[in-house]
Image (cartoon, rainbow, N blue to C red):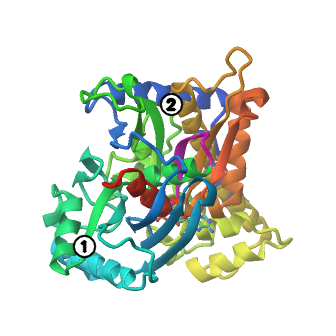
Amino acid sequence: SGRWARAMAIIREFEENCGTPIGKLRQVADAMAVEMHAGLASEGGSKLKMLISYVDNLPSGDEKGLFYALDLGGTNFRVIRVLLGGKEAGVVKQEFEEVSIPPHLMTGSSEALFDYIAAALAKFVATEGEGLHSPGRQRELGFTFSFPVRQTSIATGNLIKWTKGFSIEDAVGQDVVGELTKAMERIGLDMRVAALVNDTIGTLAGGRYLNPDVIAAVILGTGTNAAYVERAHAIPKWHGLLPKSGEMVINMEWGNFRSSHLPLTKYDQDLDVESLNPGEQIFEKIISGMYLGEIVRRVLLKMAEEAAFFGDVVPLKLKIPFILRTPHMSAMHHDASSDLRVVGSKLKDILEIPNTSLKMRKAIVELCDIVATRGARLSAAGIVGILKKLGRDAVKDGEKQKSVVAMDGGLYEHYSEFSTCMESTLKELLGEEVSDNIVIEQSNDGSGIGAALLAASHSQYL
Ligand code: ADP
Ligand code: MG
């Protein structure tokens, strides 16, 4: 019928505009490497902030002792305790507790938020076993704080802005370590913040601890970001002393990457304009878990409105932004049943669309595939950009150096169509010989442990 043809034409046009042929991916990877150079050359030199993390030595495995960590800025707030036993013993003991942040504290005052965090930490410290902590020694903490921060040292950093539903005006511009330290003092908790990092840096540190070949970390979760180890002399905007290690970890903030080579559609443009941060985080908006389901919803709405895909009436629920979450999308995409009954039940339960034919369900799976494939292939191109910047995208003089990328985040972990596609695209881009030496290593919540490890490698007792 005419309706079906119109709906299919909408999908075909969308697919065309989402296209990521290999040549385009190479252009994206090149553009990523170019922007990395520009962001390292000068402050504000690129959309890529290429933030200096002040982490110039990553864990070596020799770290010893009891360390704490806090992880704020992901889906959950966590307190973590790690007992490190050095080269032989490794992580001897590791405990954590998840604490939810009451929503009113996410939009209240800085003091109220940090008092709550300090109290949760104090309660956790109180459960520490006998004899774990050396008397006379101050407890030390790594603070994973996954919001944009302008750091001035390994343990100071001013909050640039809140994201992800937090909005506490009086904390913006403040040193978040100072805020936490004051709150700990108010309740008499004697603890020193030894390192302030974000989740990518934490994941990189946790990954390096387990595998010395780890050179970068990528987060594919609600948002997306990457960090990697750069040679300190390749950072023109760094005017400080060259670190002894000769290295510096860079927080790319790659979610903000954009390039004329990115395949953007009118659905992406509308999503961006209507978002809380128009014009920003364009790479993130076509790749990460917060947005993939929403892109699918927007195309479905268009099909409903212009091709009566779901019948004469446009389903009301389909008009609600962000109602279709990425986990719903991946459940539909992964539906292996012959009648696509998972697709049917998601449409019914979430969008209140009761009767869908198999043919319609197949079209919806195809739509999920188009959106996920674009995101996965562009993520792979981003990784190749980093490898290019480091000269690790080709075999040099027959020399085989392993490059391991530590990967974390719910999107990568749970959306196997996405992760499989990302990995096969990496192979396609790098060729067999090189890709044999590139490994993606999944790190399950390595960022918390990583922060504890960085507290250890930046301890005042070294
Ligand atoms: P965060 O990024 O907030 O630190 P996670 O790394 O756990 O948290 O990632 C959570 C995100 O991962 C969710 O917002 C969602 O977008 C994505 N996600 C979680 N489960 C799935 C799933 N089953 N399929 C696809 N995406 C998922
Ligand atoms: Mg996280």
Horizontal and vertical percent position of residue 369 = 68, 54
Does the Cβ of the disc 2 residue fall within 8 Å of ligand 1?
no
Tell me which segment is drawn in magenta: 211-223
Name the residue: 42% across, 85% down. Answer: 127
In reply to whether residue 222 is colored magenta, the answer given is yes
Q: Is residue 84 magenta?
A: no
**Label 2 belongs to which residue?**
261
Mark 1 neighbour density, 10 Å: few (under 14) some (14–19) many (20 or more): few
Left or right for 324, reference 196 = right
Residue 430 appears in view: yes
Q: Secondary structure at mark 1?
A: loop
Write the residue at 34% across / 36% down: 47
Between marks 1 and 2 in the image, the one whose residue lies nearer the viewer: 1
Q: Amino acid at mark 2?
A: His
Identify the image quadrant of the N terminus.
Answer: bottom right
The amino acid on which the numbered mark 1 sits, given as a three-letter code, is Asp
> Residue 357: x and y, percent?
76, 72
Rendering coords of residue 367 (x, y %): 66, 56
Q: Is 353 positioned to the left or the right of 446 in the image?
A: right
Residue beneath label 1, please? 190
Residue 107, above or below 422? below
Label 1 vs 2, first from the N-terminus: 1
Q: Residue furthest front?
A: 135
